[in-house]
Amino acid sequence: MGFICGFSIATGAAARLLSGYDSYGNICGQKNVKVEGIVNSGLDLTQKKYVFFLDPCNVDLVHQRVKSLALCVSACPRKELKTLADVQKFAETNGSTLCSYELQPSEYTTDPRAAKLCPKYPVPESAPIPFFHRCAPVNISCYAKFAEALITFVSDSSVLHRLISGVMTSKEIIMGLCLLSLVLSMILMVIIRYISRVLVWILTILVILGSLGGTGVLWWLYAKQRVSASAVETQIAKDNLQALLIYAISATVFTVILFLVMLVMRKRVALTIALFHVAGKVFIHLPLLVFQPFWTFFALILFWTYWITVLLFLGTTGSPVPNEEGFVEFQMTGPLKYMWWYHVVGLIWISEFILACQQMTVAGAVVTYYFTREKRNLPFTPILASVNRLICYHLGTVAKGSFIITLVKIPRMILMYIHTQLKGKENACARCMLKACICCLWCLEKCLTYLNQNAYTATAINSTNFCTSAKDAFVILVENALRVAAINTVGDFMLFLGKVLIVCSTGLAGIMLLNYQRDYTIWVLPLIIVCLFAFLVAHCFLSIYEMVVDVLFLCFAIDTKYNDGSPGREFYMDKVLMEFVENSRKSMKEAGRGGGAEGRELKPMNTPAM
């Protein structure tokens, strides 16, 4: 990817992207080299730094470009020019010629070629785009056709207008609800940190009561609005009534399913309490773990910005080639024209690599906490120590793990693209096979992601390579399949209930607030925006907690496998987890394993190298 970036910059693509170029291959703002066969190429345009399109509103949707003659000018027209006389006066006053290079300003109103070589009038008021030196119309109404093409999926434009108006009239409420979801997520993290012992029970009761209360409120609002809607027959009232009915039915079904799931899993909740308690202690000793999603998000934003920039460079790289209209296009020939395919692969791989680095960092810090008997002997900054070990020893491990995910994700994306392109054309059998393959690849990707995360934990414990760590983690997970289901899954489910609680609380507050605007605001889009944002915020905060629970579970499983509490083989676990050891021994004896370890023993991280 470094070669691709260097190639695009070395071939002048960066200058063409930033400074812009005209239809004859000249880069604006500098001297140019003559292109064989192109009349107006090789000009000295040092004083003309901006790209001006003769017909900026003529957008080619197929090729994603402005279908117009482009010229280099010294200034963009800052007011509307209605006639060729105004264009001529602008050239004489500002020294900026808006017609093709072969026409002199004195010929704008007399030369018959002016209709083709001068801009389409009225010339809209325009201003240069910052950093990219393109003259863009200030009034975006000329892009109406382009915007209309983007929203052709809406069969009834009045529906789109009502949705947009609903968002605009309730934008203050939407912003307030998004802030509320952020506050609720932070409060939940504080609760998890300090009252983890009773959190599971409180969360379970609150989610059940919240689901029942929310369902009741929705049915009450539906019944109330149905009575009032019969008196006022407006389209917005009908839409809101139908939306309320859908919400109420969905909430009822969700509440019933949630109640049944909680009834089945009630006996497993006690196992999760101890693990949550230890996870709460981890956050007390390692408070900086909460900020890991922010650093990861910042790294992803930086990489995505770099990736998009290089992709734009690639779009303007290549050799100048005359097209059918006699203008210049830059095209790459030979194998180099497929570089952008590898660039796409790099997007997936490095994005997964950054996420894997976060998992390895969290795993290293939590493993250090778990396998340190005296917590006062913890390093001053376990997270920075984990980052240091990652950079010095484990970059190859996370690179290999992320590459495996990439190998699965790329075929799934290709199949999804094929399915989208063939939609409505393939027969039922082919459609079913495509969906089955996509589903299987998705399941494989999720399984590999979970195995990778546990492999990173095993690497943090043993400092072994990726394959060895993945094998060790897989063996541990298979041997503790019941514990995986009882502790890990229930823990993730509890955190999912936390996300549901935040989304339901924010959504319920949104319904109550939007209820005051029901006569002129359609609820659907504002409520969807608020709920999606609330879920994303809750996921960012609770994903780290979920990761800590997973790492603690694997450490607990390894600790119970290779230690039995006898002298020389003391447990590393917290006292809260001790009560599960006896049940674990009984299960191992029934399975004929007796709690002994065979083969190479996983060594806990208690060496001075920590």
Image (cartoon, rainbow, N blue to C red):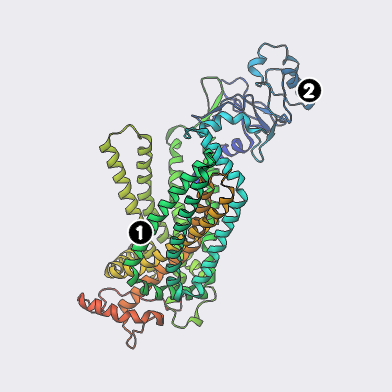
Q: In percent of the image, x 68 and y 35: which residue is there?
A: 128
- Compared across the picture, whether 160 is left or right of 137 comes to left
Viewer-side residue, 357 vs 221: 221
Whether 47 is drawn above or below 300: the answer is above
Viewer-side residue, 422 vs 388: 422
Q: Amino acid at mark 2?
A: Glu
Residue farthest right in this picture? 93
The image position of residue 457, as x and y in percent, is 39, 67
The image position of residue 232, as x and y in percent, is 54, 41
Place residue 566 in its image quadrant.
bottom left
Viewer-side residue, 223 vs 458: 223
Can the viewer see residue 469 in this picture? yes
The image position of residue 538, as x and y in percent, is 50, 60
Which element is circle 2 on?
helix
Closest to the camera, between mark 1 and mark 2, is 1
Between discs 1 and 2, the one toward the N terminus: 2
Whether 576 is drawn above or below 186: the answer is below
Which element is circle 1 on?
helix
Tell me the residue that label 2 is attached to. Answer: 92
- Compared across the picture, whether 597 is left or right of 82 comes to left
Q: In percent of the image, x 44 and y 82: which residue is there?
A: 373
- Compared across the picture, whether 255 is left or right of 306 comes to left
Q: Amino acid at mark 1?
A: Ile
Viewer-side residue, 572 vs 83: 83
Tell me the residue that label 1 is attached to. Answer: 257
